[in-house]
Image (tube, rainbow, N blue to C red):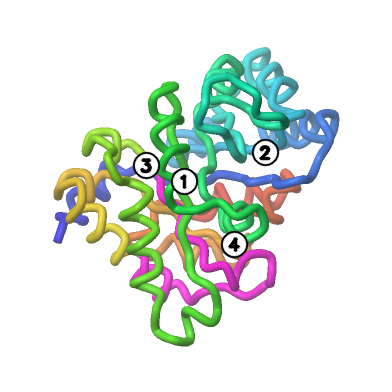
């Protein structure tokens, strides 16, 4: 088991807002500006803040962040693993990197469930994101049926093992993993903080077994699934949890700021 207590001291919490298919570029500009008004330098020192708008809003949000010198990270919600080619509708890693994107969500359950992404595809995306100098936020999680059947640990372990296949241990250590039980995404339901902590501990142990104890202690693992201002403090009180991947509650600047300032 990794020395989590030692590793956690150097793991800066990361709150990432996944806006999904919401907000035009004009809306996105307003949300980022409002968010910046509500956060202080102390907030940014204590917690890394990331917003993940749609592809059509990335350039607009990048411009606001750079013009106002905001300490807010820019993330994308998806990527294709090839650099160029006849892939209609896809966006390459270098295209995102040129927009100063720092993080890319990879393997979100909606990509897996709705668009048929496989573990192998997720692994290709993880490697492509790292090669382009960005950081993957690799998602994993179980369905309600799998949870009720006691298959949570097996499901997430399988996803993590496949997603990290062939990735250098040092690169693994710098990644972010988001544990998102599928049954809790957008439903108003969420795993208890203790249950989330237990599963994230399993993921951390899995990473340590695959990439070594230092990687297991260093990697940041978020919880996602109906995270909101009213429950974030209890979630963040858990020792294994290093932040949250926030959906609906990140669409409004006031709500997301409250989540960032959970303490």
Q: In the figure, 165 relative to 225: above or below?
A: above
Q: Which mark is residue 12?
A: 3
- Residue 228 within the magenta-colored segment of the rendering: no
Which mark's residue is nearer the viewer, 2 or 1? 1
- Residues 76 and 261: in front is 76
The local secondary structure at tag 1 comes to helix
Q: CA distance from mark 1 to mark 3?
A: 25 Å
Which mark's residue is nearer the viewer, 1 or 4? 1
Q: Which residue is mark 2?
A: 38
Q: Are marks 2 and 1 in contact (CB under 8 Å)?
A: no
Q: Kindly identify the residue that appears in the image at 41 percent across and 50 percent down.
A: 177
Which mark's residue is nearer the viewer, 3 or 2? 3
Sequence-first disc among 2 and 1: 2
The local secondary structure at tag 3 comes to loop
Q: Which mark is residue 227?
A: 4
Q: Which residue is mark 1?
A: 122
Indicate left or right for 161 with 14 as reference: left
Q: Kindly identify the residue that appears in the image at 42 percent across and 69 percent down.
A: 196
Q: In the figure, 100 relative to 123: above or below?
A: above
The local secondary structure at tag 4 comes to loop
- Residues 233 and 227: in front is 227
Sequence-first disc among 1 and 3: 3
Q: Are marks 3 and 2 in contact (CB under 8 Å)?
A: no
- Badge 3 density bin: few <14, some 14–19, many ≥20, Cα 10 Å: some
Q: CA distance from mark 1 to mark 4?
A: 24 Å
């Amino acid at each position: 088991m990794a020395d989590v207590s030692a590793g956690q001291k150097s793991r800066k919490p990361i709150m990432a807002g996944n806006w999904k298919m919401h907000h035009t570029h004009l809306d996105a500009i307003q949300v980022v500006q409002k968010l910046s008004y509500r956060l202080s330098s102390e907030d940014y020192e204590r917690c890394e803040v990331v917003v993940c708008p749609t592809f059509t809003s990335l350039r607009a949000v990048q411009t606001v962040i750079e013009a106002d010198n905001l300490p807010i990270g820019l993330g994308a919600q998806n990527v294709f693993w090839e650099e160029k080619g006849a892939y209609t509708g896809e966006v390459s890693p270098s295209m995102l990197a040129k927009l100063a994107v720092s993080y890319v969500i990879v393997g979100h359950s909606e990509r897996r469930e709705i668009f048929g992404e496989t573990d192998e595809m997720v692994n290709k995306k993880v490697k492509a994101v790292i090669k382009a100098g960005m950081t993957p936020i690799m998602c994993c999680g179980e369905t309600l049926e799998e949870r009720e059947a006691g298959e949570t640990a097996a499901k997430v372990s399988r996803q993590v093992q496949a997603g990290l296949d062939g990735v250098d241990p040092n690169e693994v250590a710098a990644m972010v993993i988001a544990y998102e039980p599928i049954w809790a995404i957008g439903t108003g339901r969420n795993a208890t903080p203790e249950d989330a902590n237990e599963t994230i501990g399993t993921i951390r142990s899995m990473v340590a077994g695959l990439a070594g104890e230092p990687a297991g202690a260093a990697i940041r693992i978020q919880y996602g699934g109906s995270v909101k201002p009213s429950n974030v403090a209890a979630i963040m009180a858990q020792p294994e949890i290093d932040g949250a991947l926030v959906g609906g509650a990140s669409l409004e600047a006031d709500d997301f700021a409250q989540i960032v300032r959970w303490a």
